[in-house]
Amino acid sequence: MSYDPNNIFARILRGEIPANKVYENAHALAFHDISPQAPVHVLVIPKGAYVQMDEFTAKASAAELAGFLGAVGEVARQTGVDKTGYRLIVNNGENGRQDVPHLHMHVMGGAPLGRMLPRS
Ligand code: 5GP
């Protein structure tokens, strides 16, 4: 999938629309999800123009990779979910049901989250 520079997270990165920031470093930004699905629901995004995780891991620099993963850990500690447990989700592409085409990690916790996927 080619990168759409007008996707909503690109616009947040450019400061064109507001976000409730949790953490930021040179390569990543974390902010509260606008429609939380758990008591803690934070999105961590790389500042670079990446759509999917496979693309990010293939093309990003070591500093970008470390900045992104480091931000995930910072968010877990800052929100306190490191104490009680949490879930990390990255939806990728069509079958992954990715709605916003800028790579993002959902950090979710603050309550028991149930099974990862409903049993069929
Ligand atoms: P996806 O389905 O792509 O994995 O997740 C996209 C997430 O972005 C959803 O959880 C949705 O609530 C969140 N989201 C969509 N638009 C905005 C926005 O403008 N601001 C924030 N903070 N979150 C958004």
Image: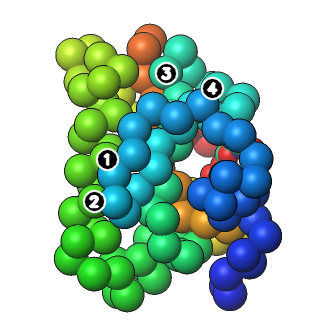
- Determine the secondary structure under disc 3: strand
Query: Dot 1, crowdedness within 10 Å: few (<14), some or many (≥20)?
Result: many
**Circle nearer the N terminus (2, 4):** 4
Q: Is residue 100 visible?
A: no
Q: Nearer the viewer, mark 1 or mark 4?
A: 1
Residue located at (64% from left, 26% from top):
36
Amino acid type, label 4: Gln
Q: Which residue is mark 4?
A: 37
What amino acid is labelled 2 in the image? Gly
| Left-right relation of 73 to 20 | left
Q: Which mark is residue 91?
A: none
* Structural distance between the alpha carbons of marks 2 and 4: 25 Å
Kindly identify the amino acid type of the residue bearing the numbered disc 1: Ala
Say whether disc 1 or disc 3 marks the residue closer to the N-terminus.
3
Secondary structure at badge 4 equals: loop
Q: Which residue is mark 1?
A: 71
Q: Secondary structure at mark 2?
A: helix
Q: CA distance from mark 1 to mark 4?
A: 20 Å
- The CB of the residue at mark 4 lies under 8 Å from ligand 1: yes
> Is the residue under label 3 in contact with that under label 1 (CB below 8 Å)?
no
Residue placed under numbered mark 3 in the picture: 40
Number of marks in the image? 4
Q: Name the residue beneath numbered marker 2.
A: 67
